[in-house]
Amino acid sequence: MLNRAIAAAKDFVGAMKAIGIPLAQSSVACECTSYLAMWEMFRQGLGVGLIDVHIGDTDPSIDRAAPSQPGLPFPIWLTAHRDILTNKRLRLVFDFLIEALATRKLG
């Protein structure tokens, strides 16, 4: 299964190879574990990488590197401490997020 192959990869190069994109480690100058830093590096034109299509497609400064490739599915986890979810207002927000995320279409 594709998601398992990506999850089993230990790094970006391994994940790319898992989905059939041949990438040499020597092609990677920087790996970033901070999502916000990675996003800003994309926006500044400092490289390529993977990002949710719902984020990337809304920013006019970002172009898809391979527009003919389908988007990659990946899990999104929504978690909270059980005591927080007993609060009615927070539960309403969580229920909204669960439904909104469940109905998203992959671009």
Image: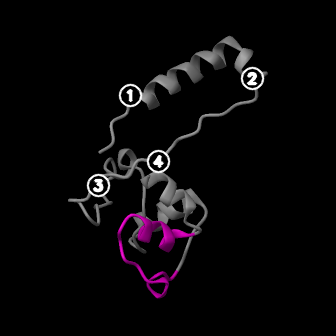
Bounds of the magenta segment: 11-29
Q: Position of residue 49 (x, y in %)?
A: 42, 66
Give the numbered dot on residue 60.
3
Q: Position of residue 102 (x, y in %)?
A: 44, 29
- Name the kind of residue labelled 2 in the image: Ile
**Residue hosting label 4:** 74
Mark 1 and mark 2 lie on one chain; the one further toward the N terminus is: 2
Measured Cα–Cα span from mark 4 to mark 1: 14 Å
**Residue hosting label 2:** 84
Question: Is 19 one of the magenta-colored residues?
Answer: yes
**Residue hosting label 1:** 103
Q: How is the image coloured?
A: one colour
Give the numbered dot on residue 23.
none
Label 4: how many residues lie within 10 Å, few (<14), some (14-19) or many (20+)?
Answer: few
Q: Nearer the viewer, mark 3 or mark 4?
A: 4
Label 3: how many residues lie within 10 Å, few (<14), some (14-19) or many (20+)?
Answer: few
Q: Position of residue 46 (x, y in %)?
A: 43, 74
Secondary structure state at the residue bearing disc 1: loop
Q: Is residue 15 above or below residue 85?
A: below
Q: Position of residue 20 (x, y in %)?
A: 35, 68
